[in-house]
Image (spheres, rainbow, N blue to C red):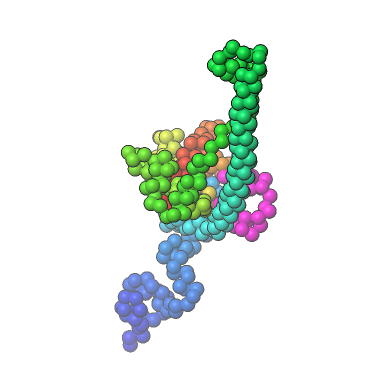
Amino acid sequence: MSKPTETCKNCEKDFEEGFEFCPYCGQKAKDELTIGVLFYNTIANYFSFDARFLKSFFPLMFRPGYLAKRFIEGKRLLYLHPAQLYLFISVVFFFLFSFNARKQVQSLDENLAKTLIKAEDTIKDQRVLDSIKLAKAERKKVEDSIARTIAKKTMMETSKFTGMTETQIDSIINSDKFKSSVNSDGMNFNLDDFGEEVDSLIAIDAPDAEIYKKMGLKDDAGYIKKKLYAQALKFYKSRKGGSILQAFYDTIPIAMFFLLPIFAFILKILYYKRGRYSHHLVFSFYYFSFLFTVFSILVGIDLIWQEFPGWIIALIMFSTIFYLFIALQKFYRQGWIWSFFKTGFVAFMFLMFVIPLTAGILAMFAFMFY
């Protein structure tokens, strides 16, 4: 007597009833599509979010260097793959960070607008003062000219100066005794304001090329310089810095894929006899996963509690370096003293050189292509 069978909805092959999963393709036999199943399958397919995640998460947070060591030893199915773990946690971090970034971009635009308004008011006030000073200076020149004329005429009619030539009388008037005072503040009254000219050209929709010339761009300038002027004019027209900041934030995920291999390369230099570069890369994946987890927690706290004590945040940030110290000692099995100095070297190189250089490149990239 044959046993009842059922057909797999995926591979369409028959198998005996009672199996929870299809013996041919592995799909669940009775897998009704619900919201929970849909969400779980999405996470599981793209991030391998299953029991391995929980088995990997707690050692990642509380056992520095353990996961990397186990993965190198060959325990590669028991725990989540380092690249998958890094990808999942980084996606969570940038998702949370996007809320914070949006507020910062909006705040920057508002503050910049207020600053520009104050600056324009200040410039207008200064122009009024300059106009008053200019009027006073011109009036002084006229008064001096009249005084010179009167003095010259009076001297020529005075018997004391009879017989002197007009040139001699002029020399007396120009002497210290008769010389008119000059403007003591030494200011240069120049009303040919650069900003006004650019604003006027923008107001009449003048071609950008004409505005570039007014800004000082020469015809033989190179591509990079022309691009800088173009972006500067674009910023001047929009008067918004949030776009640049948003472009900067958008490039951070890409930059992390370069920073992580650089971090592994530094480890390779310090531990050149302790395994292949791929081993150091595994350690870097897990350590960066830990960093993104800590950053995700901090960003989440900031979204909920903006008055969170700063000293606690500083302590948590410092703990990431202490975590690195423990992880290096456990993973590479070197003495505590050597591990301490190498931790300091890695932190110094990364914080003082690699990250600032990367931030500068990202800032330039964001300005050039926002």
Q: Nearer the viewer, residue 5 or 285?
A: 285
Q: Is residue 227 left or right of residue 350?
A: left
Residue 335 visible in the displayed image: no
- In the image, is 212 to the left or to the right of 12? right
Residue nearest the viewer, comparing 302 with 133: 133
Magenta span has 284? no
Quadrant of residue 311 within the rendered picture: top right
In terms of depth relative to the viewer, which is nearer, 329 or 360? 360
**Does residue 291 appear anywhere in the picture?**
yes
Of 335 and 46, the residue lying toward us:
46
Picture coordinates of residue 327, whole percent (x, y): 52, 43
In the rendered view, tell whether residue 181 sits above or below residue 118.
above
Q: Residue at x 63, y 40 (%)?
A: 132
Magenta residue span: 293-320
Rendering coords of residue 155 (x, y %): 64, 19
Q: Residue at x 34, y 43 (%)?
A: 223
Q: Quadrant of the N terminus?
A: bottom left
